[in-house]
Amino acid sequence: MPNKYRLTTGGTIDRKVPIKFTFNGKIIEGYLGDTVASALLSNGINTTGRSFKYHRPRGIISAGLEEAGTFIEVLGEKGASSIPATMVPIEEGLRVKSINCWPNPNVDFGQVLQLISPLIPSGFYYKTFFQPHWKTFEPFIRKMAGLADIPESENSPIAYDSRDTHCEFLVIGGGVAGLVAALMTARTGKRVVFVDNHMEPFGNWSLPLNESSSIRQWIRTLKDELNGCSNVRTLTKTMAWGYREQNLVLAYETRGVGKSELAWRIRSRNVIMSTGCTERGLVFAHNDRPGIMLASGLLNFCRNYAVIPGDRVILYTNNSSIKVLVNTLLQKGKEIVAIIDTREEGLSDYTDLPGDITIYSGHEVTKAIGWNRFRGVIASPVMGGKSVTLSGELLAVSGGWNPNLQLWIQSGGSFSYANELATFVPTNSEQDVISVGSLAGKFDFAEKINDTVQKISDLITTLGLNTAPLEIPEIDTPEDEYSIRSHWESGTVDSGSKSFVDLLNDVTLADIKLALREGYDDIELVKRYTTLGMGLDQGKTGNVNASGIISNATGKTLDEVGLIKYRSPVSPVSFGVLGKPEGEIVKPYKTTPITKWNRENGAVLYEAGANWKRPGYYLLRDESMMDAINREAMAVRTG
């Protein structure tokens, strides 16, 4: 049944505009505003791809750029490869397919690699396939490498272009902190550029639960005022992907897959980063099964796309943020089988929930059950004891929140581990840039607004500018103060089970511990030995877990371990937009008074440096180049 898991109300989709597209040759129906990911979930399609190394079944785990489970290839002359399914809006006639599987995700011949997985752990290629046998194995290894195929067409019909701009304030990120920062700086009268990678900034999934609250009206008022500011340039569907010296930010604007793309070079006196945070998963056996999602991803699909791909949900967490999802699921009439919380003290967070919801405090999930689809979990007390088996259709996990530090680190900014948040937060900056909102570790809604207002006010005062004060309504939200206890890994139930830290590159807990045993105890060495964080997503949901695992195993503090070095781009950008436009219309050649005569007399002009052209030889009638050269040489020699 089409849209089996679509809620009858809610979301930002337009149910009056149905859209059909094909996925692996099968016609799928969604609505205007859907992404490929939301449309697949609404139609009950769970296994959407295969993993990079072991070809294990994978599904959709998130709703944004952090997606590590499902990458697709867009077919046709305007095709594109290895794009997160969460970032591709559907349109009539769109054709997409899964990558890294044959013939399809449900039946993939590549899964035979799982049988030999003990023979190909992390770093196996450093220990095997030496001479004289390398040439025997090289073609096979190269065939397995990569994800999607390279497009066959040599010339792309997509229009690529570039723009340069400058401003007094650049605001990166379109959450509530970004909105507040953009409006406060706009009120100074100076030029402001606002960049957000979504189709529309200020999304609704992360707002307080009460959808009719005064907060929503306040945000709409701020949006309307900002949209009316003539000194503000808003770039939507634009991702800031690189940060260079002297506050040069590189951004990538796309109007959709197969549409025109634009490269932006933005130079700003002051940069305000509100890039937000990303939820991380939890590490346990078979934590990659289709049907296991980040809690924030499930909440996003529910609020923005009106999709909940299951009726019986199990929740697994180590922090208090899961309560927003719990209340949302209850409002939508879904059954919560159980809440599994690694914190003993976590029980106090759920006192206001209905009494028929089972809470397992001080417990951890040790193993997920199922193959092509999640079927349930085995949970045990963290300190040891009798396990319990639970069945369900969905598992929503929340291992805490990671500020999106990629651009901050690229700018030269430093960071440190905040024990009370169980994550890394920005500290000192080397350029004229500040962090606000959840990027700065302010996870509670009221706290992130107040933090942003204070920092932007201080910045404006320091610059000697003036701005109208921002009126903030009283924030009445059901969210309690954020609390978390780190939980980097769960106990395994058998040696054959894989616990994934980096889902995209199939990096397991065992891989990291193998690297440590072999002496690679620096996180950058672990990265290179295991390929941790080297995939398309750069480990957005797994890197902090990896740091915690290394800390536990080596006895180093989290500050001593640190994070892997983030490099640009933050997320993949197309090669076409990285290249510069070509042709004389873009950069005309310089001419001299004799250029016209040269052309009229058959001169073939060559680039001579500094965009000048000079004649290389002169053609007469049907001469070839060598004929002309020989004729001219003979004329010189004979006079």
Image (spheres, grey):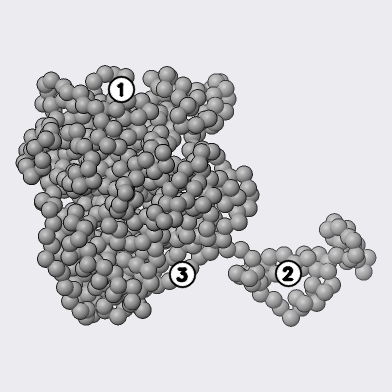
Q: Which residue is mark 1?
A: 497
| Marks 2/1: CA–CA distance | 69 Å
Q: Residue at x 39, y 59 (%)?
A: 199
Q: Which residue is mark 3?
A: 164
Q: Which residue is mark 2?
A: 614
Is residue 69 shown above or below 138? below
Q: Secondary structure at mark 3?
A: strand
As shown in the figure, which amino acid type bears the numbered disc 2? Arg
| Marks 1/3: CA–CA distance | 51 Å
Residue 61: x and y in percent read 33, 40
As shown in the figure, which amino acid type bears the numbered disc 3? Asp
As shown in the figure, which amino acid type bears the numbered disc 1? Ser
Residue 455, visible in the rendered structure: no
Q: Residue at x 51, y 38 (%)?
A: 26
Which sits earlier in the primary sequence, circle 2 or circle 1?
Answer: 1
Give the quarter of the image for residue 495.
top left
